[in-house]
Image: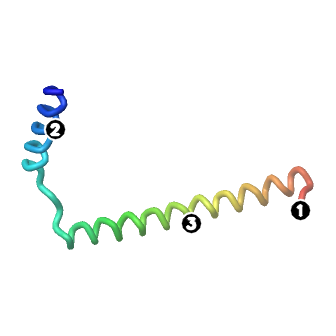
Amino acid sequence: MNKAISFLRESYFELKKSVWLSRAQMIQSTIFVFIVVAIISIYISGIDFILSSILGKIIGGN
């Protein structure tokens, strides 16, 4: 039990040393991540569509 309490206490002190992002920085980072994810998903969807079309023509599907 003492080890668990010691661990929690040390964890708390380590978290106090952390530098947290400001609200504006957090919003900017979140928007950036959403934009990158959207771009990558559009890219992957496009590649999938192209490869599916090519494969469909090769094997005679629709």
Identify residue type, mark 2. Answer: Leu
- Tag on residue 22? none
Quarter of the rendering containing residue 24: bottom left
* Residue at the extreme right: 60
- Given this view, does label 2 or label 3 mark the residue nearer the observer? 2
Q: Which mark is residue 8?
A: 2
**Left or right of 52 on screen, residue 23:** left
| SS category of the residue bearing label 2 | helix
- In the foreground, 1 or 9: 1
Above or below 40: residue 23: below
Name which of mark 2 and mark 3 comes first in the sequence: 2
- Marks 3 & 1, CB-CB < 8 Å contact: no
Task: Indicate the secondary structure of the residue bearing disc 3.
Answer: helix
**Residue at image x 86%, y 57%?**
57
Q: Which residue is mark 1?
A: 62
- In the picture, which quadrant includes the C terminus? bottom right
Mark 3 — residue?
Answer: 42
Q: Residues within 10 Å of mark 1 (few under 14, many from 20)?
A: few
Residue 9, percent from left and from top: 10, 39
Distance Cα–Cα, label 1 vs label 2 = 60 Å
Look at discs 1 and 2 and give the one toward the viewer.
2
Q: Give 51 or 42, whichever is nearer the viewer.
A: 42
Q: Please tell me in which quadrant of the rendered image residue 47 appears.
A: bottom right
| Mark pair 3, 1: CA separation | 23 Å
Colour mode of the rendering: rainbow
